[in-house]
């Protein structure tokens, strides 16, 4: 995305090694193993299905763990940023923002974030997708997992 401004339409990230190579191959390996075990049942073929399922689980859990950690870090960053840019009267309400809301607010410019945060706290913007759609001036985030 070098040279291109980040927007709602192009902000989602695909990590080709994971999304287009590792996970599809591990999932296909599981399917092939299941088909082979059904056609030629044995303890060995059943064990290969178990190992294939474990590899899919490993790849999936590694991705989930990275995303959970990323969400925690973004939450910390956004709480610090909001403490700097929100009006004083909203500071005590920052902890009311949910992780998904904080993740979405990271794309909002400093000028736009206070109004969007107020809308979140008022219950007007509940889902992160709604928040992202409401952003007019995107603050790019290209260092995502």
Image (cartoon, rainbow, N blue to C red):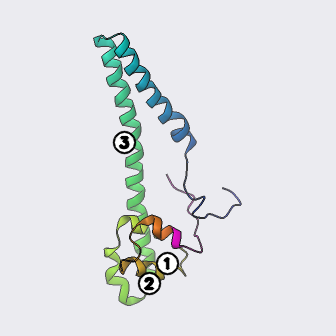
Q: Find out whether residue 18 is within the magenta segment.
A: no
- Quote the CA–CA distance across marks 3 and 2: 36 Å
**Crowdedness near tag 2: few (<14), some (14–19) or many (≥20) residues, C-alpha within 10 Å:** some
Residue 83 percent coordinates (x, y): 41, 80
| Mark 2 in CB contact with mark 1 (< 8 angstroms) | yes
Earlier sequence position, callout 3 versus callout 2: 3
Look at mark 1 in the image and give the residue it sits on: 113
Earlier sequence position, callout 2 versus callout 1: 2
Number of callouts in the render? Answer: 3
Q: Find out whether residue 143 is within the magenta segment.
A: yes
- Quote the CA–CA distance across marks 1 and 3: 32 Å
Residue 26 percent coordinates (x, y): 45, 30
Residue shown at 41% from the left, 61% from the top:
73
Residue 122 percent coordinates (x, y): 36, 81
Look at mark 2 in the image and give the residue it sits on: 86
Which is more toward the observer, 35 or 99? 35
Where on the picture, by quarter, is residue 76? bottom left
Residue 28 percent coordinates (x, y): 47, 27
**Crowdedness near tag 1: few (<14), some (14–19) or many (≥20) residues, C-alpha within 10 Å:** many
SS category of the residue bearing label 1? helix
Q: Is residue 83 visible?
A: no
Where on the picture, by quarter, is residue 62? top left
Residue shown at 45% from the left, 25% from the top:
29
Dominant secondary structure of the magenta stretch? loop
Earlier sequence position, callout 1 versus callout 3: 3
Look at mark 3 in the image and give the residue it sits on: 61
Magenta region, residue range: 133-145
Q: Against 94, is 74 above or below?
A: above
């Amino acid at each position: 995305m070098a040279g291109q401004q980040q927007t709602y339409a192009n902000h989602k990230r695909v990590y080709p090694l994971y999304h287009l190579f590792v996970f599809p191959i591990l999932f296909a390996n599981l399917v092939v193993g299941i088909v082979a075990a059904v056609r030629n049942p044995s303890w060995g073929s059943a064990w290969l299905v178990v190992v294939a399922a474990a590899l899919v689980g490993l790849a999936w859990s590694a991705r989930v763990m990275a995303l959970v950690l990323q969400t925690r870090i973004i939450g910390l960053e956004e709480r610090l940023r909001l403490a700097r840019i929100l009006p004083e009267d909203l500071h005590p309400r920052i902890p009311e923002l949910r992780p998904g809301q904080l993740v979405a607010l990271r794309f909002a410019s400093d000028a736009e974030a206070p109004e969007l945060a107020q809308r979140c706290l008022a219950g007007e913007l509940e889902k992160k997708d709604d928040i992202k759609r409401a952003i007019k001036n995107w603050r790019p985030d290209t260092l995502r997992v």
